[in-house]
Image (tube, rainbow, N blue to C red):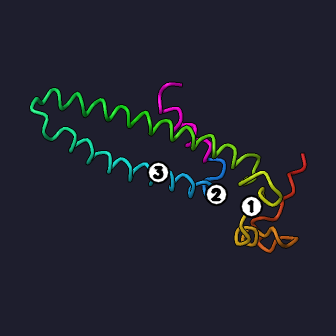
Amino acid sequence: LQSSWWAFNLLNNWMQLGYSKMVGDMTTAKQKLQKEAFEFHEIVRAATKFVPSESVAAAIATEMSNKFMEYVGDEWWQLVFLMIAKYSNGLVTTGEGPGERKAPGYPDWWLQSVGYTEWPPSNPSTQPTNPPVA
């Protein structure tokens, strides 16, 4: 699993289990890395600006960029492991103490709109139908 692709793909697949619960954590991590990437770009430009040889400057920029991408991959793996630990079994775990594990369930607006809060449901399209008798 030396390619960072695995970390990005695994997180993408994991988030399919509860995107709305997880998107905030992923977005925070993504924004942090994007900010660092823009800052890093300026550092690379400054580091290579006065190198007289274009090929040497390119080699320096390439080496620096490769190291930064290793860092991004490592950070994304850490995020994957955090997300798996935090969002497992339909729960949200933020620690090991009492009250640090919650089952968010479905939002109230959705439960009401599908008739979950009433029986029999008021929406005729949700009424069970009798199977045809053979």
Name the mark on residue 104.
1
Earlier-in-chain disc, 1 versus 2: 2
Residue in front for this viewpoint, 37 or 132: 37
Quadrant where the image shows the N terminus: top right
Earlier-in-chain disc, 3 versus 1: 3
| Alpha carbon separation for disc pair 3 and 1 | 24 Å
Rate crowding at label 3 as few (under 14), some (14 to 19) or many (20 or more) other CA atoms within 10 Å: some
Residue in front for this viewpoint, 76 or 57: 57
**Can you say whether 77 is above or below 34 in the image?**
above
Name the mark on residue 38.
none
- Provide the secondary structure element on which disc 2 rests: helix
Disc 3 marks which residue? 30
Residue pictured at 66% horizontal, 48% vertical: 17
Q: Residue furthest left?
A: 52
Tell me which segment is drawn in magenta.
Answer: 1-15
Residue pictured at 75% horizontal, 51% vertical: 90
Residue pictured at 32% horizontal, 45% vertical: 40
**68 lies left or right of 24:** left
Q: Amino acid at mark 3?
A: Lys
Rate crowding at label 1 as few (under 14), some (14 to 19) or many (20 or more) other CA atoms within 10 Å: few
- Foreground mark, 2 or 3, reads 3
Disc 2 marks which residue? 21
- Magenta span: chief secondary structure: helix
- Foreground mark, 3 or 1, reads 3
The x, y position of residue 91, in whole percent, is 75, 53
Q: Amino acid at mark 1?
A: Pro
Q: Amino acid at mark 2?
A: Lys
| Alpha carbon separation for disc pair 2 and 3 | 16 Å
The x, y position of residue 128, in whole percent, is 84, 60
Instruction: Based on the picture, tell me whether residue 94 belongs to the magenta stretch.
Output: no
The x, y position of residue 4, in whole percent, is 47, 32
